[in-house]
Image (cartoon, grey):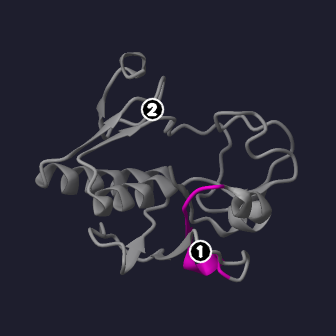
Amino acid sequence: TYYLSINSLVIEQCAEDIRALPMPKFLSWRSHPLIQPSDDMMFLHTTYTGPKFARDVRGRLWEGATVTYVALQLAYFMGFKEVILIGVDHNFSTQGKPNTTITSQGDDPDHFHTAYFGKGFRWQLPDLETSERSYRMARQVFEQSGRRVLDATVGGKLTVFEKIDYNILF
């Protein structure tokens, strides 16, 4: 089990909770001033410039507009032959210019739990177009290596990866 966060706003607002997690943590290098390093914390050199898929995460990783893309690069580097995505609904009711920082005004309609980004939490609006571009790159790299990414999200709107029924997995 691993924890991954690349978003500086999330890390800043959740630093105490992140530090308390009893598992290896991967965080963006940009966040190192926001959170005290520990033995179970690894900083990744993520970048907004790309596009590229890093087969070796010891260098720079393009964020691809989503933490899920960075997770796919980590999974590839770790040698996973099959990755199953769960909870990538790829659908947001909150609209606006991608990457714009907003402050949640109440219940969160865009994540798996209404309190995920609760009232007062600052977050950026998604860039679904760039996310899809990065997902297509990940799919290509995985498939070229004889690996695969499957999507078991119930009701998800992402169409890049082959779907698999969540209920048959568990």
Residue, disc 2: 157
Residue, disc 1: 39
Secondary structure type for disc 2: loop
Q: Is residue 54 above or below residue 87?
A: below
Residue at 87% across / 46% down in the picture? 119
Find out whether residue 30 is within the magenta segment. yes
Residue at 65% across / 45% down in the picture? 95
* Residue 7 vs residue 106, the one in the foreground: 7
Q: Quadrant of residue 97?
A: bottom right
Three-letter amino acid code of the residue under disc 1? Asp
Three-letter amino acid code of the residue under disc 2? Lys
Q: Position of residue 156 (x, y in %)?
A: 47, 30
Question: What segment carries the magenta color?
Answer: 22-32
Q: How many residues crowd around disc 2 within 10 Å: few (fewer than 14), some, or many (20 or more)?
A: few
Left or right: residue 3 versus residue 56 is right
Q: Position of residue 51 (x, y in %)?
A: 33, 70
Outermost residue to the top? 167
Q: Position of residue 70 (x, y in %)?
A: 43, 61
Residue at 30% across / 63% down in the picture? 77
**CA separation in Å, label 2 and label 1:** 38 Å
Residue at 42% across / 77% down in the picture? 49
